[in-house]
Amino acid sequence: MIKKQKKPSGLLWITGLSGSGKSTISLQIKKILSKKYSNIILLDGDILRKRLKIKKSLFFTYQKRKTLGLKYVKLCKEFIKMDKFVVIAAMALIKDVQNEYKKIKNNTDIFLDVPINELKKRDPKKLYKKFFAGQIKNMAGLDLKYDIPKKPSLFIKWNKSLTKKKILKKILKQIDEK
């Protein structure tokens, strides 16, 4: 059996609007990295909110998203102190949150830029459907402002020919270059 190495502690933050593929991509990245490294940890915004028992009505506002994002940064820092390489899939589309995670040593941030029309087609959590039916509000990218990351480590602009495999390859190359 080959002994796994430890990846230098650090952070890979994958962000984008709801339905952009953050969770799907981060799960694949974790699987790939975990084959070689023993200290990879995955945090997912959806799962964190569930575990922390945060009701959706409490986090949709800009201020609640900011507070939650800053808590995620703090949690990432704690895992990094434990010599972990953290892969996190969370919206983090607020400048103050971005500024905080950018301070972390060995950080990489990926912005998945997917147009609203494509997000409406995907709509895995039916949030866009609920928004346009008037059932929810304060949705980032629609009626809630968001801050596109300035100078992310990798800006991935969606197009029809961009496969999951191509995205993974770009992200893994970015991580290796750091």
Image (cartoon, rainbow, N blue to C red):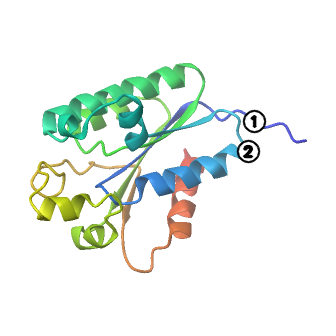
Vertical placement of residue 159 versus 127, above or below: below
In which quarter of the view is residue 157 placed? bottom left
User: Dividing the image into 4 quarters, which one contains the N terminus?
Assistant: top right
What x and y, as percent, mark residue 37? 70, 39
The disc at residue 5 is 1
N-terminal-most mark, 1 or 2: 1
Circle 2 — which element? loop
Circle 1 — which element? loop
Q: Residue drawn at (33%, 26%), measured in percent from left and top?
A: 71
Residue ID for mark 2: 36
Viewed as shown, does residue 73 lie left or right of 78?
A: left
Dot 1 amino acid type: Gln
Vertical placement of residue 137 versus 78, above or below: below
In which quarter of the view is residue 44 placed? top left
Crowding near pointer 2: few (<14 within 10 Å), some, many (20+)?
A: some
Vertical placement of residue 59 versus 89, above or below: above
Q: Residue drawn at (38%, 41%), measured in percent from left and top?
A: 45
